Image (cartoon, grey):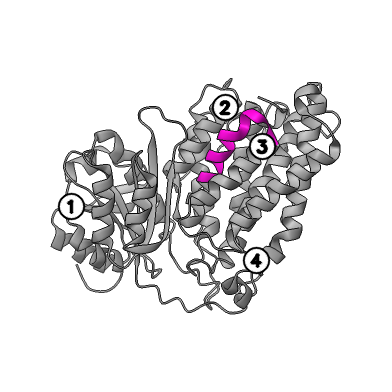
Amino acid sequence: MVGRLLDGPVLRRWLVRAAQALEQAGPRIDAVNVFPVADQDTGTNCLLTLRGAVEEVAALDPAADGPAVLAAATRGSLLAARGNSGMILSHWFAGLARGAAEGVVPALAAAARSARSAVLAPEDGTVLDLAAEVARAAGDARRGEDGDAGGLPAGAAADEDREALASALAAGQDALAAISGRHPVLRDARVLDAGACALLVVLAAWVAAADETLGAPGTLGAEGPDATGDLRLATALDLSWLPESAPAALPERGMSGFEVMAVLPAGDDDALRARLASIGDSVAVVAEPGDGPGRLRQSHVHTADPAAAVAVVQGAADPEPVLVVVEALDGRTSTAVAVTGSPERVPELARCGAVVLVAGPGVPAGRWRPTLDRAVRDARAGGAHRVPDAVHGGDAAPAHDPAPARDLASAPDPAPAHDPGPGADPVPVLPGAWAGECAAALPPGATLIAEADDEDRVLAVVRALAGEVPA
């Protein structure tokens, strides 16, 4: 692989640094999220998506090379992707993995193209334009250096890649306001695009990881002060360029629909996008790179008819059964997970604030645990579409998952990233169906309410948790 920035140790450190940076930047990014839905969750969704990449990479052999790390990061981010922003970020990683064999600059170009392809109807003035600008600037910087990494000594090639990436980051930061101003919703709210802000934070972490792992520019490959990978010695990223205030004017929320997401086997992505577009918007489909067996993809749609979306996803996965996650877009939450086998019951459960898991017969046992784990994380974070009081007139900060990112080098067996720690209330899981499967796959931080074993009882408990009616 050309260029030390794409070596395994640098990539490992980058992912952890990026997750740490998004933990810090998340509330600011959430606050300016007004498009495509003004639900202030882009920072949270990108963080949860990136943590999926971190955890997948943590399972690799510590000596894994760059291609293996990128493949794991792609799979982990795809399986953990939340919302439009997470889907785009995971597809950006997929493109980076596809282009990495040619070097950093081609990888950034492939990542930009891949991110755009994830969205059915790309709009001007968003993270997609920012990714393209970063790729263009990296190419310009590399051409300006008049060098070819393939013909340079390793240290010189790494220096040039690092400088190209740093130049691209600076160009992206400089272009951020102008790019955001091209989108009418962002322009009216006078905010930067939240997804673009998140991508720039991720890129800044890559530059920092390269410097910390390989040494300062001009000395790449030297034994640095934190060559052990101990992130406690890392320098904090400069996030001062991020906005510190909420939008001047939020768009009318008017969100009465639902977000429907599912992980399903690889297939005809264009056909699935078209079917989802016929029943909703904000359509995205992201697939693992390659053509080998066992590949997966994730689908995303906002719709007023979640039962129809569930049917589309289940049909696309047929004959393999899938688990579908549904959340309301109105920002209400009861901090609970409701499991149902009846798609027609989804709207009332989700409107009460539950994260709803729709299941059918024959779901493999191995799929229950990761999907329940995801639903519990979302419920604990207040749902993917909670409304932070800090943005809508209150004093509370956005409900961010407080757990730190994993240090892949110095902490091989930390608690799960969503573990709330001692004293935190467990998230109730209400099995209106599939109680046995839920009990066998219950993740940490969750508790099974076994008496809620029918659909009517589940709805009553969810309403009680939401403070609507007594159970």
Label at residue 106: 3
Amino acid type, label 1 = Gly
Q: Which residue is mark 1?
A: 341
**SS of the residue under disc 4:** helix
Q: Residue at x 56, y 32 (%)?
A: 70
| Residue under numbered circle 2 | 67
Label 2 amino acid?
Answer: Pro
Q: CA distance from mark 1 to mark 4?
A: 42 Å
The quadrant in which residue 352 appears is: bottom left
Local secondary structure at mark 1: loop
User: Can you tell which mark lies on residue 180?
Assistant: 4
**Number of other residues with Cα within 10 Å of mark 1, as a class: few under 14, some 14 to 19, many 20 or more:** some
Q: Residue at x 49, y 47 (%)?
A: 49
Residue span colored magenta: 91-104
Residue 221 image offset from top left, x and y in percent: 78, 24
Name the secondary structure under disc 3.
Answer: helix
Q: Left or right: 40 with respect to 281?
A: right
Disc 3 or 1, which lies upstream in sequence? 3
Looking at the image, tell me whether mark 3 or mark 4 is earlier in sequence order: 3
Question: Are circles 1 and 4 on residues that touch, CB within 8 Å?
Answer: no
x%, y% of residue 392?
52, 76
